Amino acid sequence: MFDTVSEKAFLLRQLVKRDLTSKYKDSVLGILWSFFNPLLIMLVFTAIFSMLFGRNIDNYPVYFLSGRILYDFYSSATKGAMNSVKRNASLLKKIYVPKYMFSVSAVCYEFVNFLISFVILFGVMLITGAEFHWTAIFAIIPIMLFIILIFGVGLILAVCNTYFSDIGHLYNVFTLILMYASALFYPIEIVPAKIQAIFTLNPVYSAVTCFRESVVYGLFPDLSTLSYLAAFAFTVFGIGVILFNIYEKKLALEL
Amino acid sequence: MGIFNKIKNIFNPGANKDYANLLDEDVVVNVEHISMEFKITRDKIDTLKEYVIRTLKRSKKEKEKVRVLDDISFKVYKGDKLGILGFNGAGKSTLLKILAGVYEPTSGNIQIKGKVAPLLELGAGFDKNYTGKNNIYLNGAFLSMEKHFLDEKFEEIVEFSELGEYINYPVKNYSSGMRAKLGFSIATLVEPDILIVDEILSVGDIKFRKKSSEKINEMMAEGVTVLLVSHSISQIRKICDKCIWIDNGKLVMEGEVNEVCDAYIANAIREKNN
């Protein structure tokens, strides 16, 4: 069972497809909501925060969106992976399916949404007349590292959440703190210098910084930030894989 | 097993498995000294708050271990039809779930050769909003089938399930019989080497019941290995050629089907009279 890669790949495609179709079931616009939903939310955020911080930052909508789409991806993908095992409990108690497939599919599903919000970001860049930089292709490096980080965090949370159901509630608060600690909608300069040092420890902030440098400012991402992100991402990923492997078989007993 | 061993096993799967016994070509299922324990507490701690408070107050109740299976070993050879007998709560379903890979035994080894089709829970992975057609692919994926295989078998599945036009309707509108028919049709078309069945031969109406038992007979004629749990002794006598009897998690008897069935019935009558 599930010995070959192609069997797993087919299952993964089916799972992602199921998530995509079931989310907007019975809505008139259907899958188009995957596009409109983030667009409308971002319009609201941009309108509100432009008034608050708009004067300090050039092209505020692009500044805000470039951070926000990464944070949204992180928050929804880790939460999706966290609930993935529990949500499929009834199935996992009956037949054998590798449990990590559900966590992986949750992250892949959110990755699809992330790609859609990319379209929105580029649309906003076009409308606001932002400059397009060739360095934007380097953004792929922080994004890859970011995905590795998300997989690691997601696997750890999936195990913890199966044992303790309140991890989910705690994590919601944690992501809120993370949002404010990622300098999404305000300039980092308004933060006191001492506290800025703490910000640099936040891997989401590192990813956002690298992403903005390459896409918005036309720079090569800062190497030290990038290597910090890489070290953090691979460590968390390693812990996640090991933890999940140890507990995978036991999880069926806890569901 | 220490945590380091576990980590080592991740990178070297199968390191502590003993493959020597599998040199015997004809053994398809090899169960060696399997024990299964469930930990149960009278009040389960499943929130972090409670866990922390109980740990601080040192009032964590000792977990009780319930031994559902105790040192069970048996071998199934290719083409065997093995019946599994036992009263309710004897551990039969747990054993099947271990064989299907849902649970990992607390101790002991298990080796299985070939593709397993667990007919434990028909249509367990159905998405109720999906049409029958989409569910064939989704459920097929859960049973580790591939797209081209399902494409090939699609017509056959639809025809066997007798759903006709309804295949294009969402499964939430199906009757439970229709759901079971579709689940059965998908699960049996895997061309499995080993069929694990838990009281399932009575699916759908009388017409489909006849058809499904014919299908199972046909598969058995092709040499599929069958593991069957049933409370119907006549069914076990009819289908199986070997039998094991489990009571309270222990293997009581193993052998030729009629011998074991006779002993089982004699025991049941004795217990009833007491």
Image: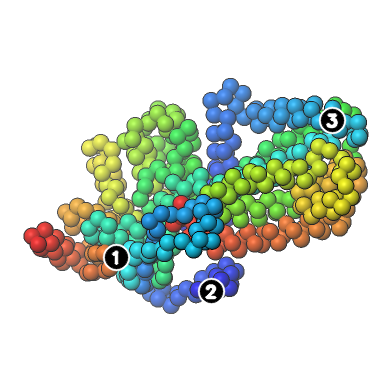
User: Foreground mark, 1 or 3?
Assistant: 3
Q: For the residues marked 3 and 2, what is the alpha-carbon distance in whole angstroms?
A: 56 Å
Residue A34: x %, y % from top left? 65, 31
Check contact, mark 1 vs mark 3: CB within 8 A: no
Crowding near the residue tagged with mark 2, few <14, some 14–19, many ≥20 C-alpha atoms within 10 Å = few
Check contact, mark 3 vs mark 2: CB within 8 A: no
Q: Which quadrant of the structure image shows residue A42? A: top right
Which numbered tag is attached to residue B249? 1
User: Foreground mark, 3 or 2?
Assistant: 3
Amino acid at the residue labelled 1: Gly
The residue to which callout 3 is attached is A52
Left or right side of B68 for A113 = right
Taking the spot 25% from the left edge, 36% from the top edge, the residue there is: B205
Crowding near the residue tagged with mark 3, few <14, some 14–19, many ≥20 C-alpha atoms within 10 Å = few
Mark 3 falls on what kind of element?
Answer: helix
Amino acid at the residue labelled 3: Leu
User: Relative to the observer, which residue lies in front, B29 or B44?
Assistant: B44
Q: For the residues marked 1 and 2, what is the alpha-carbon distance in whole angstroms?
A: 27 Å
Would you say residue B149 is visible in this rendering? no
The residue to which callout 2 is attached is B2
Mark 2 falls on what kind of element?
Answer: loop
Taking the spot 37% from the left edge, 69% from the top edge, the residue there is: B34
Mark 1 falls on what kind of element?
Answer: loop
Would you say residue A155 is visible in this rendering? yes
Residue A254: x %, y % from top left? 46, 55
Q: Do marks 1 and 3 both belong to one polypeptide chain?
A: no
Residue B220: x %, y % from top left? 29, 55
